[in-house]
Amino acid sequence: MMLYLSRRVDFSAMHSYRIPEWTEERNKSVFGLCSNPSGHGHDYKLEVMVKGNLNQKSGIVVNTVDIKNVVGKIIDQELDGKFLNKEHPYFIKHIPTTENLVKYLWDMISRSLVDCELHRLRLYENPYLYSEKVEGEGNMVHLTRKYHFSAAHRLHSDELNEEENLKLFGKCNNPFGHGHNYYLDVCVNGIPDAVTGMIIDLSYLDEIVETFALNKLDHKHLNLDVEEFKGLNPTSEVVAKVVYDMLAPYLPNLHKIGLWETEKNYFEYFGPNGVK
């Protein structure tokens, strides 16, 4: 009986994204504000998910305190309170991007666990950016960036009559529409570049998402103002798919789109081929 459980461990560290052989102009062009040689810092949140068989005597897979102790020891000794570029042997040679950090932590944690196996690591640099590594994917890393837009919509299907629409969608069928503060998770994947440590240039990602998605959706009535929803019922399932189709031509490593309609309602779309 395979079960999965997770434990979160927090730490603080500072870093800088710089390649000494590059000019100051090139470092700023590629890494932006992160290229500041004095460094900057984050309060990281690391979610550690493990898997294992249920111990019939104890009723647990492994004590989560044991996970905390194993991971906490690695974090305390190597990362917490450190300027990673200057104090950590690995990150003196490798830029401590979130992608490189999650790869390094995977290698360290996976060989330190007892009575369970590492299934997934998710490292939050801040509430709007995290990297993730999942078992069985080799050196592949996922990077997710969160964006926000406000929009209105009316849930109404031309395939249903008025009574059926009202019964199915309730208040959301209001003829004048209603609105949400949507949060959009754009997830790309790939193997971090050996030089920059990044899967994608974040400034490029931001530009693509803003140009081809946010500028079309933000402060709009989806049914009335957005060409991509003509003939479509803009449910959040459909919005997630439409946003994926907006971005996919410009992001060849697009993995999935996640859409928060509210804090309680979340939707994902992985593209026409399903989960990759």
Image (cartoon, rainbow, N blue to C red):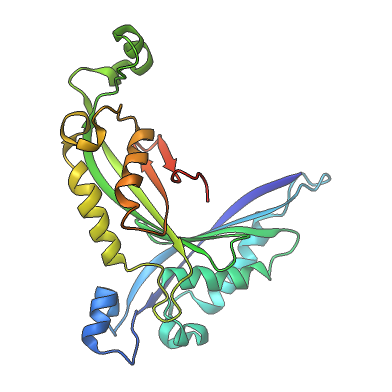
Residue 87 in the figure: left or right of residue 150: right
Residue 61 or residue 18, whichever sits in front: 18
Report the residue at 32% width, 80% height from top.
Answer: 39
Residue 4 at x, y = what percent?
A: 65, 48
Residue 229 or residue 198, whichever sits in front: 229
Report the residue at 45% width, 60% height from top.
Answer: 189
Residue 251 in the figure: left or right of residue 10: left
**Image quadrant of residue 157?**
top left
Report the residue at 22% width, 54% height from top.
Answer: 210
Residue 112 at x, y = what percent?
A: 68, 70
Q: Quadrant of the N terminus?
A: top right
Residue 43 in the figure: left or right of residue 66: left
Number of disc labels: 0
Against 275, residue 220 (above or below) is above
Against 266, residue 144 (above or below) is below
Residue 200 or residue 263, whichever sits in front: 200
Report the residue at 38% width, 76% height from top.
Answer: 14
Against 72, residue 82 (above or below) is below
Residue 65 or residue 38, whichever sits in front: 38
Q: Residue furthest right?
A: 57
Residue 16 at x, y = what percent?
A: 34, 80
Q: Residue furthest top?
A: 163
Residue 166 at x, y = what percent?
A: 32, 12
